[in-house]
Image (cartoon, rainbow, N blue to C red):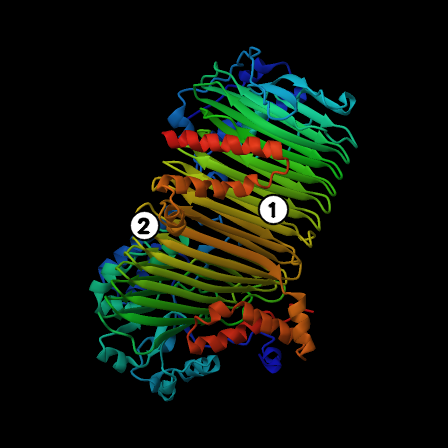
Amino acid sequence: MKNENINHNQEYKYGFTTDIENIKAPKGLSEKTIKFISKIKKEPKWMLDWRLKAFNRLKVSKEPDWQKPKFPKINYQDLYYYSAPKSMKDKPKSLDEVDPKLIETYNKLGIPLNEQKKLSGVAVDAVFDSVSVATTFKGELTKKGIIFCPISEAIQKHPDLVKKYLGSVIPISDHYFATLNSAVFTDGSFVYIPPNTRCPMELSTYFRINASETGQFERTLIIADKGSYVSYLEGCTAPMRDENQLHAANVELIALDDAEIKYSTVQNWYPGDKDGVGGIYNFVTKRGACRGKNSKISWTQVETGSAITWKYPSCILQGDNSVGEFYSIAITNNHQKADTGTKMIHLGKNTKSKIISKGISAGKADNTYRGLVDIGRKALNSRNYTQCDSLLMGNKCGAHTVPYIKNKNSSSTIEHEATTSKINEEQLFYCNQRGLNQEEAVSLIVNGFCKDVLQQLPMEFAVEAQKLVGISLEGSVG
Amino acid sequence: MLNFKINSNEIDNIGNFNAKEKEFRLKNLDSFNKNGFPNKKSEDWKFSDLREIVSKNFKKLDLKLVKTKVQKINFIKEFDHNYIIVTNGELTSSNFKFEEKNKIKVQSYSNNSFTNKQEENPLINLNHALSDKGYFLEIKENYKFKKVLVIYNLYTSNLNENILNCKNKIKIGKNSELHILEYAINHSKKNFFNNIYENVILEESAIYKNISIYNEKSFGYFHKYSSNKLDKKSSSTFFIFPSGLKFNKLDLEFDLNGENSECNLQAASYLNYDDHQEIKTRINHFAPNCKSFQKVKNVLNSESKGVYQGKIFVKDNAQKTDAYQLSKAILLNDSSEFNSKPELEIYADDVKCSHGSSSGNIEEDSIFYLMSRGLSRQESIKLLINGFLSEITDEIKSNSIKNFIVNKLEDQLHEHKKH
């Protein structure tokens, strides 16, 4: 990690706002708002009914409060539930028609939206606020029969697939924020990989919260049919802002027989300033179902942003011999609070899961790993291995581990280990002795601490993630 | 039974109390009546739904005092010891023939400190409201016990759907040392509920060792909350062999208030039939340079259920904390279940805290190895279980007590194997 990099990135790198006129839904949460969203998305009736069903459920459910970080009460009537860049009203046919200001924003973010960037091998479904702007590499994907499009488009063009799978992993009655998302989700990505197809490139999407006071409600649905493989990348950056913003996304993955889904996230939402003012509330529901035999779902996440993060990417291992993996790095600094982990629910025989979680806490931050491993009575010969390590920097921060471990049959094995410590003085001394300053040494050691997880990331992300690890801890030592 | 409510005049039946105590008892009774027995909706009872267990196994809960006749018991002959006999929770006799009597105070316990702290555990509320028996044991400063003190906990045969609420307190003065063996003897053939609240106070440099074991299968449903407060350089060691109860929840809390204090907790149990056992610990590191160590081993057979909820809390000023927690379980049967929640909550950075938890069956390789040496499968499994549990018993320093415990444990294993 070069020193310049750290210094250049002292302030939040992506804190800029693009001035684009927005179409907004009527303020507040009501049936009217939902009908407005549904209408503007040109949705069929069954979709609207589904949303309304979720909305009715929402009326009787309560916000969860068992998480460690508490948050100030959100006034749901004071939020806008839909905002789209105006220039998107008539969908652009090519990149030339896209608002140049948007392109500029993406360029600042370094998203390879231009065709020239085809060489980088990334197909991008960029979501600016709520509407997907442009999709590249479509031709190549279509040839293979792969569907990669905004979910609003999928609702119109592939209603059978959407009807069959939407809400099948995260039911609309799941919990408050998942239900809220089901009622008001605006857009997101839809991926379908046909049988025996290996997706030729890493699919990727960038979310960006832009318009002020707009909660963003993304919905992602990925289906890997029999014998297919897909790797999906999600990256987030959000502009600097004082007001707290709510982000409640739902991500559903479905892997059928012999299919594999790899889902990687680098999350860098605005964490609030040094005094804990502002920042994003990231209350995300991510869940994958290994429906088929020998299927595999792997979650990798690098969480560095957000004022409050509640996120538990989970795997439901239904198919025999299915595999679930979870690799996570959660870094909290200043006043950030993260409560993150996973659930591995073993239902099929010979199912395996692995959890590697690395939490780093600095400043006045609180970092919690919360996880569940549940091996059911019928999940014979199942196995789980969990490792949670926490690193503390300074005595104002906290690191917590709350694992729930349930074993209900004798042929299965669960192993869990966790440690909490600070950076080893001897290692620091050794690095200093070799000419690295304190900050470089810490960055090096922390990157080493996170290596098990960073290794799991695809190339494109690994580089960004390594930088992020250094930047996030900036100013926490010395 | 589901809506188990207790009338406030039950308090008057226990005795005459001054206004302050009455108020304290009434307040706690209200809390209990409001919540009833805890169910799995409550985080601390997630894995042990007591409401369900109680309503399934009890038709009624009798609050009336059980008449305790003085009964003969078989004293332990293996080693010399002092003793206290506690019958159905009530202190009935004591004998300190090996000690200096003026250094020891023992009496029936009556509560005289009423905190305003609102307890969240309904069973503590219940105890605060209705406790009517127990003992208070005090060891004066600078006195080391010469022989171990055995507390015979006797449960008589006339217990029948009774609920006992006992309060015990042990106070060990500066530089003093006490070793206790808690030994439960059960004559009851009927269900009963025992709800214990225990308070242990260790003054500076005090040493406390406690071993507890149940002699035979019992129809007891036990809940014990134990609060342990440790001052500077004091140390507390617990060995728990809690097998044989229908339901048992041990809720142990240790406050390491003084620097360089230490606590060590080890448990080994063999659960069978539909036994349900939970060990819940909370170790609060409130001061720097303290150590805590926990090791919990469970062997689960038939439809038994084992739970371990352990929490290590480290306050921001408790630097140089060394905390360790290990839970291991062997499941012998597909109907058995083991749940654990090893928790860390840490606010200080210069600490060494770790925990591990594992559960699974006995390794086939190990069984194969022993069988290849001529043992039967059954013998191999028994040998391996013995080895698994003896890791805990080996830590007991006194040889005579260790042998006593090992024999008792083997009886338990053997007893269970017969069925």
Real-space CA distance between mark 2 and mark 1, rounded to the nearest whole angstrom = 33 Å
User: Which quarter of the picture shows residue A180?
Assistant: bottom left
Q: Amino acid at mark 1?
A: Phe
Local SS, label 2: loop
Q: Is residue A461 left or right of residue B233?
A: left
Give me the disc on residue B393.
none
Task: Tell me if residue A361 can be seen.
Answer: yes
Local crowd size for mark 1, using a 10 Å CA cut-off: few (<14), some (14–19), many (≥20): some
Residue drawn at x 63%, y 14% is B16
Residue under disc 2 on the same chain as residue under disc 1:
no
Q: Is residue A326 left or right of residue B84?
A: left
Residue A54 in the image: state x and y as whole percent.
Answer: 32, 53
Task: Tell me if residue A15 can be seen.
Answer: no
**In the image, farthest residue toward the front:** B374
> Image height check: is A137 above or below B15?
below
> Image height check: is B38 above or below A418?
above
Residue A365 in the image: state x and y as whole percent.
Answer: 59, 60
Give me the disc on residue A379.
2
- Closer to us: A185 or B249: B249
Q: Is residue A391 left or right of residue A409?
A: right
Are the residues tagged 2 and 1 within 8 Å (C-beta)? Answer: no
Local SS, label 1: strand
Residue A274 in the image: state x and y as whole percent.
Answer: 62, 66
Residue to which mark 1 is pinned: B293
Q: Which part of the image, by quadrant, shows the C terminus of chain A?
A: bottom right
> Image height check: is A119 above or below A35?
below
- Closer to us: A223 or B169: B169
Q: Which part of the image, by quadrant, shows the N terminus of chain A?
A: bottom right
**In the image, farthest residue toward the left:** A160
Q: Amino acid at mark 2?
A: Ala
